Image (spheres, rainbow, N blue to C red):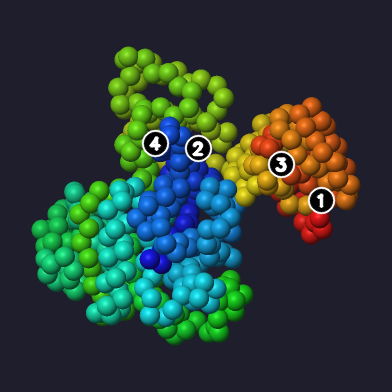
């Protein structure tokens, strides 16, 4: 199975855990069998590999998410990087060209497109395999998954099949309706459109060449910023007469808001939290190193992270995005390919950060022109390189780098340090990377 997972967006509806770098699919909400927590992307990737160990999984994403993907899934996962956001048609065209030109997937093989964050069981991914097999038959140019609706939702578009068969020609598509209209669609046998579909690789390659002037993957990548911003639905689906839909009646949830997400949590609290016996229908997600105590609360969601604190009525939590859009703040937490960082303190002329490096990883070799830096190693062992000079470091060591100095640090074991940045103009843009010859 060739599957492209679409990973985009900032997930601001899950503030304060999500931000412009840390989208909802990277937040670890779900408890595993060994009592650890995994994210949506980790859960989906694990489920795909359980169903099909040989599945060729590609994640189509923006460059801001690449580090988090590598952090959570490792360096070997396939990634089609969008140089900038151009909506779903350019993203799918680029991923398809990547599969053909880089991964050498044949034109007659099928590709399944799926969002990265559905909350489903393994039968969903068995259905994706069937979707791909149906596309390879060539009876239709696109084969969509239609999800059996459980209520007249106003959040989804609807697919109305021509028959009630498991696989049917699509009669028509309907946009997101009001509740009464949704009821009438369901009475006609309509299915939710979950944004999942399959096609032969050749079909989308041909469509891409029809609409975009490019030669191969590398050329398309170079021209990406010049492409029209357009959805796959508008560019392709609405103009394609040969479309089938396959029914899926298994469990399927879109965990796009705090309200829906907390319904899928295995326990009422994550992190350090205490609920008294008078609390009812309360969920707490706490990423801070301080306890949260809730007393006598009902139908409430509490979430705390370095980005902020949310206390909300369960229903009102769905309307958080316009409020969060008005908040302008520095990113306080992010996962990188080498580990993670957590901003501890922000001042006019200083920034203090706790950095964690994963074993065997290192930062980029880099310098800053407008700030000095101090590293105070608090645990673990590693190696520091400063202007080409290498030395081992351990807990208690302090390394000072003046502005313009090239530096990096690598971890032998998990390495934690406190980084203090000092300067009148501290900016994420003040960074120049270099090739490290070791």
Kindly identify the residue that appears in the image at 62 percent across and 47 percent down: 336
Residue corresponding to mark 1: 367
Name the element at disc 3. Answer: strand
Q: Nearer the viewer, mark 4 or mark 2?
A: 4
Gap in angstroms between the C-alphas marked 3 and 4? 29 Å
What label does residue 411 carry, if any? Answer: 3
Decide which of tag 3 and tag 2 comes sooner along the chain. 2
Instruction: Give the image quarter of residue 334.
Output: top right
Decide which of tag 3 and tag 1 comes sooner along the chain. 1
As rendered, which of 327 and 8 lies closer to the eye?
8
As rendered, which of 364 and 257 lies closer to the eye?
364
User: How far across and how far down the image is residue 113, in percent?
Assistant: 38, 65
Name the element at disc 1. Answer: strand
Kindly identify the residue that appears in the image at 53 percent across and 62 percent down: 79
Gap in angstroms between the C-alphas marked 4 and 1? 43 Å
Q: Nearer the viewer, mark 4 or mark 1?
A: 4
Residue 355 visible? no
Gap in angstroms between the C-alphas marked 4 and 2? 27 Å
Q: Nearer the viewer, mark 3 or mark 1?
A: 3
Q: Is 35 above or below relative to 210? A: above
State yes or no: discs 3 and 1 in contact (Cβ < 8 Å): no
Gap in angstroms between the C-alphas marked 1 and 2? 31 Å
Name the element at disc 4. Answer: loop
Residue corresponding to mark 4: 33
Q: Residue furthest front?
A: 53
């Amino acid at each position: 199975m060739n599957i492209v997972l679409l990973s985009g967006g900032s997930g601001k509806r899950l503030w304060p855990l999500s931000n412009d770098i840390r989208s909802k699919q990277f937040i670890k909400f779900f408890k595993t069998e060994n009592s650890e927590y995994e994210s949506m992307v980790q859960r989906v990737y694990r489920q795909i590999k359980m169903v099909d160990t040989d599945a060729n999984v590609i994640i189509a994403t923006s460059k801001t998410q690449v580090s988090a993907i590598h952090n959570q899934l490792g360096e070997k996962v396939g990634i089609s990087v969008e140089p900038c956001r151009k909506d779903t048609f350019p993203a799918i065209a680029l991923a398809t060209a990547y599969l053909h030109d880089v991964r050498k997937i044949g034109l007659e093989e099928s590709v399944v497109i799926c969002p990265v964050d559905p909350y489903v069981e393994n039968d969903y991914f068995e259905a994706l395999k069937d979707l791909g097999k149906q596309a390879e038959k060539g009876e239709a140019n696109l084969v969509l998954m239609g999800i059996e609706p459980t209520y007249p939702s106003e959040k989804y578009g609807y697919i109305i099949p021509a028959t009630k068969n498991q696989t049917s020609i699509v009669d028509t598509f309907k946009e997101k309706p009001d509740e009464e209209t949704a009821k009438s669609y369901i009475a006609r046998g309509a299915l939710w459109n979950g944004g999942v579909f399959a096609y032969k690789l050749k079909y989308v390659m041909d469509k891409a060449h029809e609409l975009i002037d490019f030669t191969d993957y590398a050329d398309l990548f170079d021209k990406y910023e010049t492409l029209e911003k357009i959805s796959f639905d508008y560019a392709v689906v609405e103009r394609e007469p040969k479309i089938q839909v396959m029914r899926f009646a298994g469990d399927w949830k879109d965990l796009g808001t705090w309200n829906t997400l907390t319904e899928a949590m295995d326990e009422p609290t994550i992190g350090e939290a205490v609920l008294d016996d008078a609390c009812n229908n309360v969920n707490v997600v706490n990423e801070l190193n301080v306890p949260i105590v809730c007393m006598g609360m009902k139908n409430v969601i509490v979430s705390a992270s370095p980005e902020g604190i949310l206390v909300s009525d369960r229903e009102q939590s769905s309307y958080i995005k316009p409020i969060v859009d008005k908040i302008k703040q520095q990113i306080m937490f992010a996962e990188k390919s080498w580990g993670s960082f957590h901003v501890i303190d922000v001042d006019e002329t200083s920034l203090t950060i706790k950095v964690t490096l994963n074993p065997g990883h290192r930062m980029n070799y880099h310098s800053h022109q407008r700030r000095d830096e101090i590293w105070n190693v608090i645990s673990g062992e590693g190696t520091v390189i400063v202007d080409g000079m290498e030395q081992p470091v351990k807990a208690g060591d302090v390394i000072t780098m003046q502005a313009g100095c090239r530096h990096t640090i690598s971890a032998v074991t998990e390495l934690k340090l406190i980084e203090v940045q000092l300067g009148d103009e501290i900016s994420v843009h003040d960074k120049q990377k270099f090739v490290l010859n070791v």
